[in-house]
Image (cartoon, grey):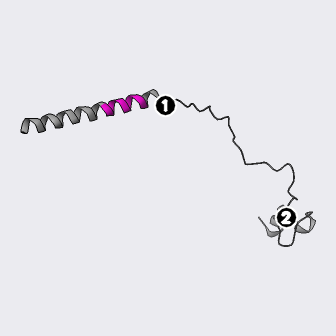
Amino acid sequence: MSDTEHQSMDPAPDDTPDLEPGGGVAPGDTPPDTPQTSGLSHQQPERTKNFPAGGVGALVGIGLLVVVMIVIVVGIIVMMV
């Protein structure tokens, strides 16, 4: 691509309205049709406040394992005495 072709593709700063020296745009001069990037792009699923059944099962299972281990340790200590 030649230098003259490249220059014709770039916008002319002298012809661009509300362009400040250095190429910046004054606050409030942004076009209103500029796409917004804030917010969610998809509908988010509703959050539940219930603890999942799998989590309850895991906690119960761990609790049972702890109780069984305590019983075994106490049994071993009693047999040693």
What residue appears at the point 17 percent right and 34 percent down from the top-left corner?
72
Tell me, yes or no, whether the highlighted magenta stretch contains residue 59: yes
Mark nearer the N terminus (2 vs 1): 2
Label 2 sits on a secondary structure element that is loop
Pointers 2 and 1 in contact (C-beta within 8 Å): no
Residue drawn at 91 percent across, 69 percent down? 14
Q: Is residue 31 above or below residue 5?
A: above
Direction from residue 47 to residue 35 in the image, left or right: right
Q: Main secondary structure of the magenta part?
A: helix
The span from disc 2 to disc 1 (Cα, nearest Å) is: 51 Å
Name the image quarter holding residue 2. bottom right
What segment carries the magenta color?
Answer: 55-63
Q: Assess disc 2: are there few (<14), some (14-19) or many (≥20) residues with their C-alpha within 10 Å of its C-alpha.
A: few
Q: Nearer the viewer, residue 65 or 35?
A: 65
Q: Amino acid at mark 2?
A: Val
Taking depth in this image into account, of 60 and 1 the one nearest to the observer is 60
Residue 30 horizontal/vertical position (percent): 85, 57
- Residue type, label 1: Phe
Q: Which mark is residue 25?
A: 2
State the residue at coordinates (68%, 37%): 42
**Callout 1: SS:** loop
Q: Is residue 36 above or below residue 11?
A: above
Judge left or right: residue 49 versus residue 1.
left
Please give the name of the residue rendered at 82% of the width and 50% of the height, measured from the top-left corner: 34
Quadrant of the rendered structure where residue 53 is?
top left
Disc 1 packing (10 Å; few <14; some 14–19; many ≥20) = few
| Residue occupied by mark 1 | 51
Residue 4 image point, x, y percent: 84, 68
Residue 28 % position (x, y): 87, 58
